[in-house]
Amino acid sequence: MARLPRLYLPGCAQHVIQRGNNREACFYADADYKAYLSFLKDAAAKYQVAIHAFVLMTNHVHLLVTPQSEQAVSRMMQAQGRKYVQYFNYTYRRTGTLWEGRYKSTVVDADNYLLTVYRYIELNPVRAKMVSHAAEYPWSSYQGNALGKPIQLLTPHVLYNQLGKTDNERQVAYRGLFNGMMTDQELTAIRDATNKAWVLGDERFKAQIAARTGRQPEPAGRGGDRKSAAYRNQRH
């Protein structure tokens, strides 16, 4: 199925992926991760984008964000990306592009998928077998969201805050979300929606987005629904 144009919806959470060109590494040393997070923090503040979760992998980045204006995410990614490329090229005496074209993103149904996307992002190093538990990876938001480490970049989403009445209650409840791995269905839904710019949510949320934007939330199926009686009758 085809990739749809990106949606820009103020106040709606988005999952963002930024990949290194040709899947090549975009972080080599601790200083690189720190530089990226510093540039991201400045750009997020400038363009009023709340960062709820993140992970910096060797050759790509995942973010869970909520923008306050239509073009905020795009401007944030352009600003931090440009500064990081300048830093990276100067540090490693290289030239040319670092990122694989434009970032990818999807809007997220907060009521049904927000905390799942939190988990998806922070479990990346575990799925990649880089660590055995999310707490062991230093370049993600898990240590802030689950363990209370101060991370100035982070802004808790309202649904995260509803996990408990105190910081400790929220962190305990959040850690409980990480008991066990995610299902294949959850992984596929997030990956397809983000890589193809579909809407990540239930049918009600998709209908709301379609009504709000005038754009279909995902590509129409080709050839009809193969499970429907009407389709089977057309085939015979």
Image (spheres, rainbow, N blue to C red):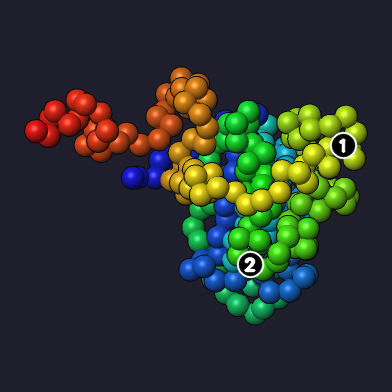
The amino acid beneath tag 2 is Lys
Locate residue 221, reporting x and y percent: 30, 36
Label 1 CA crowd tier, 10 Å (few <14, some 14–19, many 20+): few
Locate residue 167, reporting x and y percent: 89, 38
Q: Which residue is drawn at the image coordinates 17% and 31% (left, top)?
A: 232
The quarter of the rendered structure image containing the C terminus is top left
* Pointer 2 residue: 129
Question: Label for residue 185?
Answer: none
Locate residue 158, reporting x and y percent: 75, 30
Is 221 rendered above or below residue 89?
above
* Pointer 1 residue: 169
Looking at this view, is 114 or 63 the one in front? 114
Label 2 CA crowd tier, 10 Å (few <14, some 14–19, many 20+): few
Q: Earlier in the sequence, mark 2 or mark 1?
A: 2
In three-dimensional space, the C-alpha distance between marks 2 and 1, rounded to whole angstroms, equals 29 Å
Q: Residue furthest bottom?
A: 93
Q: Residue furthest left?
A: 236
To which quarter of the image does residue 68 belong? Answer: top right
